[in-house]
Amino acid sequence: MSKSSTKKSKSFTLTENSTGNSFELPVLEGSVGPRVIDVRNLYAETGCFTYDPGYTSTGSCESTITYIDGEDGVLLYRGYPIQDLAGKCDYPEICYLLLYGELPTELQKSKFEDNITHHTMLHEQISTFYRGFRRDSHPMAIMCGVVGALSAFYHDSLDIADPSHRMIASYRMIAKIPTIAAQAYKYSIGQPFIAPRNDLSYSENFLHMMFATPAESYEVSQTLAKAMDRILILHADHEQNASTSTVRLAGSSGANPFACIAAGIASLWGPAHGGANEAVLNMLEEIGHIDNIPKFIKKAKHKEDPFRLMGFGHRVYKNFDPRAKIMQQTCHEVLEELGIKDEPLLDLAMELERIALEDDYFIEKKLYPNVDFYSGIIFKAMGIPVSMFTVLFAVARNVGWIAQWNEMVEDPSQRIGRPRQLYLGETERTFVELKKRK
């Protein structure tokens, strides 16, 4: 897909109060979304940097992959609404779309899936690598270590200047991440690893590696496989979030792709990023019972009370999370498939959802249930432990990281990341020899 050229719009005039000097800064327009002020020459022209902790008002790159409109609740992958993709595609189609910019034809999809399927096995020595971890290691710690170590096993895909190397590395990451994740889970519970199966779909294969044992056959539920497919699609990419920015920043130094994805996994592990669905379950356990909901609703409304309802509202989406409605539907399908009707924690979540959707306070503040509220409930219902929640997020987001990394490598305007700072430390001091210090 051809990349749309950046359009120059009107300029932005910056006036320095102390001198009265004015500086013209170009204003750039994308194909959709807010305009951006181009500050690349700001320091050269003014001797000043911008100050933007967290870079929340800074555009760090050009991209054609994902677009978010937080005000109107819009999420597009390569221009396609997430609602259409999650309802009509499977995860490999989304992988192809994010990597290549277009939805595949039947022939392209078949060839792509065949290539992915035949890369799902891990090098046999990697299996022994797991034994170096303690059995009670967090699965995300294992993910960071094993994914980073892939560069020690696959030397034929480390040259980032070679398009064929990048393609092989991309396919390997998409194929092997579910295997690595499933083996991290199996290792944590002391069960033998289950080899991937080429006759299963992407999501079916992942569930099979997670839950099958050598002792008996395991039949993958199509409802659960469909639910896993949707979860993976809904989390596949989300613009320049913390972990994606980490992947790009690591990649800007020329680091190999496996190291960059490991860096993204480490960033995702943070509770403020990938741990939100785990926080939802912790909150539900704190509430404890349906009868306690009014008390905690009151606490959530009180400005001085530190308690917050996790899984409601979103930092980017100021209206509603477009992924949440799909996840809500998926949640109810999973609960029905598994025949779960009397699980206290899930009953509590459903009642909290009902109240939040009807309460004037939540409606006025636009605190609607987000994708994290439902995903944690689905995972719990499927028997996936809390320690694996963020791992599944990494499995889904992996393709987004890869697509963003590839785009960054191919972008001639990208340079090594080098944020600046507002220094507040000591100015130059006179050195005093040790014997003379008081």
Image (cartoon, rainbow, N blue to C red):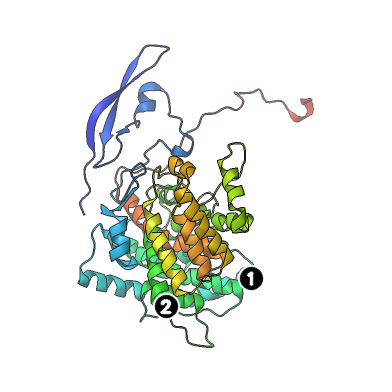
Q: Is residue 26 above or below residue 116?
A: above
Q: Mark number for residue 135?
A: 1
* 422 left or right of 221 in image: right
Label 1: how many Cα within 10 Å (few below 14, some 14–19, many 20+): some
Q: Mark number for residue 146?
A: none
Residue drawn where x is 44% and y is 40% of the image: 364
Q: Residue furthest top?
A: 19
Tag 2 secondary structure: loop
Percent coordinates x, y for residue 408 in the rendering = 34, 49
Q: Closer to the camera, 115 or 148?
A: 115
Q: Is residue 379 above or below residue 338?
A: above
Quarter of the image for the N terminus: give it.
Answer: bottom left
Tag 1 secondary structure: loop
Q: Mark number for residue 221?
A: 2
Quarter of the image for the C terminus: give it.
Answer: top right
Q: Amino acid at mark 1?
A: Arg
